[in-house]
Image (cartoon, rainbow, N blue to C red):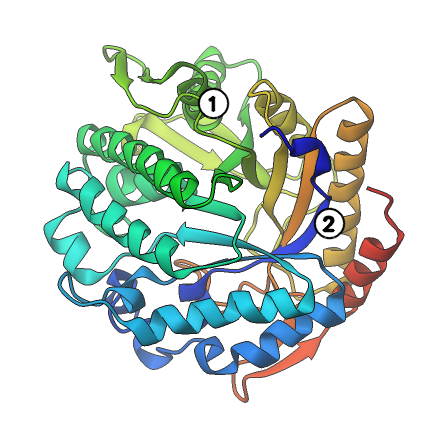
Amino acid sequence: MKDSAAWPFLWGVATSAFQLEGSPHADWSSWDTILSERPAVTNHYELYREDLALLQDLGVNAYRFSLEWSRIQPREDRWDEEALGHYREITEILGRYGIEPMLTLHHFTHPLWFIKRFPWHEDASVDRFLAYVRRVVSAMDGVRYWITFNEPYVLVLAGYFEGCTPPAIRSPQLGVRALANILRAHAGAYDIIHDACPNARVSVAHNMAALAPWKKWNPLDKLLSRVAKYFYNHSLLDAFLTGSLRIKFPFREEMNIPVPIRGKLDFFGINYYTRIHMRFNPLRNMGVEMRHLDIDGHGLTDLGWEIHPRGLEKVLRYAARLGVPMIITENGIATKDSQKKIRYMKEHVEAIERCRRQGMDIRGYFYWSLIDNYEWLQGLDARFGLYRVDFGTLRRIPTNAAAYYSFLIRHRSF
């Protein structure tokens, strides 16, 4: 972007609509029994004004939130203007608070009609998604920062390689087709947004991880981690640079798939949480076994993920070759221990400071998440929130971590 030098550093928090409010029209609603017991999750759809007021208490200048597509388009032939108005009101409230909205168009969930008739491996999926994008862009004023897709590789790996999330298909071949269509959808969405708002700043939020061999001396573990690192972290970067999605798995023919996304990136959103150790195990799906090891002594989260701040520096160095500003669009820890949450934030922000001193163009940090929410396949026990949710009363309870983040924002000189 020509005006990139004028960007302020964005201190924010990130959320996902479905994880806060659920939706009766979404594919995930019938996927997990806990959602049938608590379909409104935190009841954010009703309590959004109170939740947005927490942003003022924190002192953030940016807020990343998503739209729930299935509420806006519950049927292929029906648009819910009330739902669109609800999300438009969120941007209006943020404007009154002086908080920059960052809007995510797709955060894992789909309308049921879409996932049943036009899943991502079908080419028709792209046009259906872009119809939704056009409707949203025409209705949402005052939004400059857009995320088209949240973690497209996670979506494809879980939905098509592992088959543990919708559409629950175990086919790497269809998964690659789905990924290519998602990237084509990004390209179309990028153009639609820029046609409506030439000064928009558009990206994806790419989940990146520090990947390492389980045993450094084992050549198969080293090969596997190297292949996984390229596919998971780097292949999307190369696709934005070259317009070609390169897929290379061991013992399979390399694929180069044209995708029209070259240069269609105004900044790069990075979601970073952990390091993963990998080993070759022929008894596992695709021969891959993964685990978390507390090698550096930073500990593990309540989900068993390794806390590894140095990994954030590594992925930022990877992404810097794109030549666009970078924003950490998600970084957070699942823990009930507020002091552990504070240490996590402190260590990762210090990693960002080191990268900025090295000349990396980093323009924002969004902590995940504002309040506790539903965590995919983990239910309600993964406590990522700066504000704790009592799921019995739905009361939002401030933590010491929220106070620390406010202090951090006020005293950092970014």
Q: Is residue 116 rendered to the left or right of residue 402? A: left
Marks 2 and 1, how far apart in space? Answer: 27 Å
Residue wearing tag 2: 344
- Residue at image position (34%, 33%) is 187
Q: Is residue 305 above or below residue 249?
A: below
Q: Residue 253: image x %, image y %?
A: 23, 10
Residue type at mark 1? Leu
Give the left or right position of residue 282, taking residue 305 as reference: left
Answer with left or right where residue 253 lies relative to residue 65: left
- Residue under pointer 1: 237
Q: Residue at x 65, y 33 (%)?
A: 3
Q: Nearer the viewer, residue 279 or 12?
A: 12
Q: Nearer the viewer, residue 250 or 18?
A: 18
Nearer to us in this view, 369 or 93 = 93
- Quick one: 413 or 94, which is closer to the camera? 94
Residue 304 in the image: above or below residue 70: above
Do the residues bearing badges 2 and 1 touch, measured as CB atoms within 8 Å? Answer: no
Amino acid at the residue labelled 2: Tyr
Circle 1 Cα neighbour tier, 10 Å, few/some/many (<14 / 14–19 / ≥20) = many
- Report the residue at 58% width, 71% height from top: 93
Residue 16 on image: x %, y %: 47, 60
